[in-house]
Image: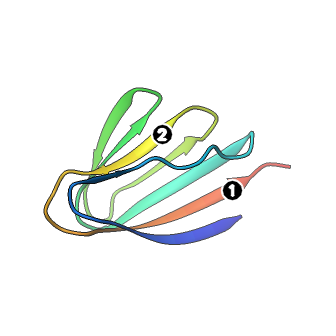
Amino acid sequence: MEIYRAYLQPNSTYYPEKHHHNTTELATIMSGTITININNESYILNQHDSISFSTDGTHSYANHTNDVVVLHIILKYEI
């Protein structure tokens, strides 16, 4: 398991590297609003919202606002 605090700059997008097979990602928005794209589906999350998903497909984080977004990300690896 790995835990991160991430800061996404205004008007930017983050495309994570490919994760290990059978990895689950849990993201919680600590401040701001973010759009998360998972396998071509978009989800808009606001402060204190969370989402959990399998990272076997593609995903990205987009900040379409003028404020820095802070999020916590947990990666859980299956053995």
Q: Position of residue 1 (x, y in %)?
A: 71, 64
Query: Which amino acid type corresponds to the residue marked 2 in the rendered image?
Result: His
Q: Residue at x 28, y 54 (%)?
A: 12
Query: Residue reaching furthest left?
Result: 66
How would you rate the neighbour count of disc 1 (Cα within 10 Å): few for under 14, some for 14-19, many for 20 or more?
Answer: some
Q: Compare residues 61 and 51 and report the one nearer the observer.
A: 61
Query: Residue reaching furthest top?
Result: 40
How would you rate the neighbour count of disc 2 (Cα within 10 Å): few for under 14, some for 14-19, many for 20 or more?
Answer: many
Q: Is residue 38 left or right of residue 35?
A: right
Query: Which amino acid type corresponds to the residue marked 1 in the rendered image?
Result: Lys
Query: Residue reaching furthest right?
Result: 79
Q: Residue at x 68, y 56 (%)?
A: 76
State the SS at label 1: strand
State the SS at label 2: strand
Q: Compare residues 42 and 8 and report the one nearer the observer.
A: 8
Q: Which residue is mark 2?
A: 59
**Which mark is first along the chain, 1 or 2?**
2
Q: Is residue 39 left or right of residue 55?
A: left
Q: Is residue 77 left or right of residue 55?
A: right
Q: Position of residue 53 (x, y in %)?
A: 54, 42
Q: Which residue is mark 1?
A: 76
Q: Position of residue 66 (x, y in %)?
A: 13, 63
